[in-house]
Image (cartoon, coloured by chain):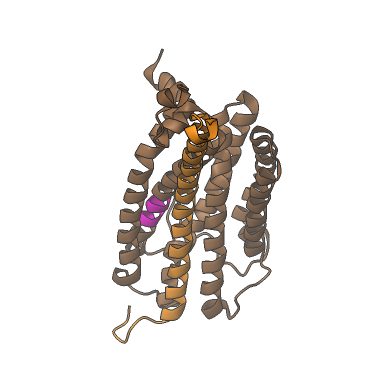
Amino acid sequence: MSESGMTYAGYVAAAYAVFVVVLMWDAIVPLLRIRRTLRNVSLRAKRTTARQAPISSELQR
Amino acid sequence: MNPVIRWFHQLGSPPYFDRFAARWAPWSFGLGLLVMLWAGWQGLFVVPADYQQGDSFRILYIHVPSAWMSMFVFGLMAFYAAIALIWRIKLCEILAMACAPIGAAFTVITLATGSIWGKPMWGTWWEWDPRLTSELLLLFLYLGVIGLYQAIDDRRNAARAAGLLAIVGVALLPVIRYSVEWWNSLHQGQTIRVFGESSMDPSMLPPLIGMVIGTKLWFIGSLLLRARADNLEREAGKDWVRQRAGIDTATERTP
């Protein structure tokens, strides 16, 4: 880097920004997929448990 | 049985792989990030500017490792796909398909940073140069593999079809590598050699080596995480996945 500052600074910054943004996307997407899958499994299990629960006395009467 | 072979057999088990990936992916990401931060700092602020290109040459520290990764990941994807097709190993199908979006991401970085670098140096954002065009074809191949995998409902058939495309696509890798030698190209030739003397000044090499190692570590983390996500989706109905989701499978079964 020269004393007067970086030459082509805008181009260098843009290139590094692309690198950071794409790598962040690369890390975040699978994390969200894992979280969504585990949440769906959990919700499905809760629905199954609710379906198997005894019917309330109000309905039995 | 040999412990290494036994470990490979164990790794093929979906719950074992899930535990393995969950444990090692954060380490790989963390180490990769640290190495890349160091290399990025060196490349941006410590290494002297190039006598011809000025500071624009600093784009090299992300452009070149990404370009190498774009080809390395494709080769690895085809390797996993070949193993999956020959020995029908489910984990290799998952790993092959997990490679595709990561490789596509590195190809996008290569094309974008190359274009940004090309504007001040060549005076244009894009040129239908053999190296640039063949790298663009590599991106289309990655997108083709991803698209084919998503287009077929049966996960195993989808992975086999997309894996076959990956294996055929390997033919493009030598074309990318030697395009600057085979055709008259605007893109510069090879300046860094693993075997033999590089035409790059030695003071400029450490950040590049750091970025190469950093991107490899990042790739391992991303591969483990993406393979884990696919593995969990495929096995969503199994007890071990319910346990991972925090459900007590013993009480769930009791009416």
Looking at the rendering, which quadrant does residue A20 occupy? bottom left
Q: Is B223 in front, or is B240? A: B240
Work out whether residue A20 or residue B40 is closer to the camera in this orientation and state it. Answer: A20
The location of residue B14, given as percent across then percent down, is 48, 29
Which quadrant of the rendered structure holds the N terminus of chain B? Answer: top left
Residue extending farthest front: A61
Residue at 32 percent of width and 50 percent of height: B30
Report if residue B160 is visible in the image: yes
Q: Which residues are magenta?
A: B209-215
Q: Is residue B239 left or right of residue B203?
A: right
Numbered marks: total? 0
Q: Is residue B191 visible?
A: no
- Could you say where residue B155 lies in the image, as x and y percent from the top left? 64, 36
Describe residue B104's horizontal placement relative to residue B254 as left or right. right
Report the chain shown in orange: A
B78 or B243, nearer to the observer:
B243
Q: Position of residue B66 (x, y in %)?
A: 49, 57
Instruction: In the rendered view, tell whether residue B193 sits above or below residue B77.
Output: below
* Residue at x-position 57% and y-position 64%: B111
User: Residue B106 in the image: x percent, y percent?
Assistant: 52, 56
